[in-house]
Amino acid sequence: MANSIQNIGKIPELRKRILFTLAMLAVYRVGVFITVPGVNRVEMENVVSKSTGSFLGMFNMFSGGALEQLSIFALGIMPYVSASIVVQLLTVVIPKLDQLNKEGEQGRRKINQITRYGTIGLALVQGFFIAQYLESLSSRGSEVVVDPGWGFRFVTVISLTTGTAFIMWLGEQITERGIGNGVSMIIFAGIIAGMPDALFQYLSSQGGSGGEEGTGNFGMLLLLLLVLGTIAAICFFERAHRKIPVQYAKRQVGRKLYQGAQSHLPLKINVSGVIPPIFASSILMFPAQIANMSGSVFLQDAAAVFGDPSDWRYNAIFTVMVIFFAFFYTSVVFNPVQVADNLKKGGGFIPGIRPGKNTAQYIEKVLTRITFAGAIYLSIVCMIPALLMKYMSVPFYFGGTGLLIVVGVALDTVQQIESHLITRNYEGFTGPKGPRIRGRAAGRPAPAR
């Protein structure tokens, strides 16, 4: 491990990418503390602190603590995630978008541009409802807004929309010029930044709850065991994969005869990674945000199910959405027909399965089974917050969703760093004889020798 960290500094490109990523994340964290003009930050912190474990607490976690500061980054990256979900779903329905998606790099650029416009539109709507929500807080006795009115609403909408656009740009820059996926890294940085304060508040509540010392110590020990067990389970399932044997036939190229080789096609149990819980959380938070910040009693009652992560109805809907997005995102990133065609072109085949259509059907059948297992694993891990918050009053940061995002993004980042090291003949983090850390995309078969 120490040698691998030293080797990072020996690769100029990798060193620049890591430093660039850290610089962009530092800019993001600085922006979290820039408050929207006309807002009393202290009063807003009091409002959010009283809503721990509710919709506002969850929204504050995904925004990296920007909501309690009511900063220009209060909307976070969620409008971009929501727009991406909508565009990907429309790609399946609208033939023109599907055609753009198949046109390669140029088509993807157009789709990304459509996603950006959708992000700005969602940010404008959400920003307006946040402005109204802040004014409603002032009418209830919390002097959050210094000077309410249309001037304040206009400034708030522009500030929040600009902040979301800037975060979107930061994420794209990290993806292109840094390490890891930009959107995931921003959410990862926000959760990590809030964990120390959440741990301190939890320990303080345990120490000052008035209960017996042994009971408090037992609760903290149980929490530690649950967190460590969850992290171990996440690491196990994120690296687990199903190996499909692949046999390559003998072939002659010129005067050289290449012997048949045996390989395997690794299919990850969880191909979609942390995308399903992020997508599901984003979809559920949007109607709850609009309802809670609209000031309408009817909408607030109707959306009450979306604002309580410990409610069984919320968890039931969340589980269904996680399973749906696990299958949906897997179908987007992995195409069994294309994999079967590549195997056929390379002279490879699965023993006992005919090349071509039958191979694609077999791969799709295996992929469906393991994706269902991966979706169940994601659902179980993401249900942990409900149990911890309901029975142990644990902050949302230490629930399954937060830990899944943190551990998953960390594994992806380490895998990318390891790929750079191995490419330049350096040892990876797992050593020369240890198993390689695999990324989220399903593996490709080895070429015929």
Image (spheres, rainbow, N blue to C red):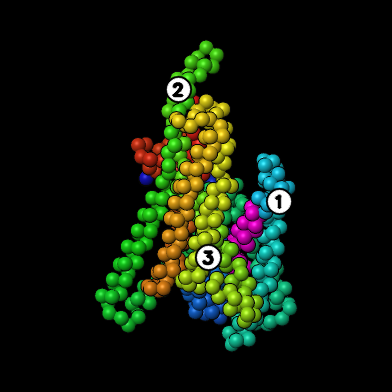
Q: Main secondary structure of the magenta part?
A: helix
What distance separates the C-alpha of mark 2 from that of mark 3? 50 Å
Residue 318 pos. (x, y %) = 51, 64
Of label 2 and label 3, which has the lower sequence position? 2
Q: Could you say which quadrant of the image residue 207 lies in?
A: bottom left
What distance separates the C-alpha of mark 2 from that of mark 1? 44 Å
**Residue at disc 2, secondary structure:** loop
Residue 386 versus residue 315: which sits nearer the camera? 315
In magenta, the rendered stretch is 69-89
Name, please, the residue furthest toward the top: 255
Task: Using residue 413 as the reference point, say whether residue 129 is left or right of it.
Answer: right
State the residue position of label 3. 317
Q: Which residue is drawn at 65% across and 50% down?
A: 92
Q: Is residue 188 above or below residue 308?
A: above
Residue 424 pos. (x, y %) = 47, 35
Q: What residue type is labelled 3?
A: Ile
Task: Using residue 181 as the reference point, say whether residue 203 is left or right of it.
Answer: left
Residue 219 versus residue 96: which sits nearer the camera? 96
Q: Residue at x 58, y 84 (%)?
A: 142
Do callouts 2 and 1 mark residues in contact (Cβ within 8 Å)?
A: no
Query: Is the residue marked by circle 1 packed among few (<14), some (14-19), or many (20+) residues within 10 Å?
Result: few
Whether residue 373 can be seen here: yes
Of label 2 and label 1, which has the lower sequence position? 1
State the residue position of label 2. 260
State the residue position of label 1. 94
Of label 1 and label 3, which has the lower sequence position? 1
**Residue at disc 1, secondary structure:** loop
Task: Using residue 133 as the reference point, say whether residue 179 is left or right of it.
Answer: left
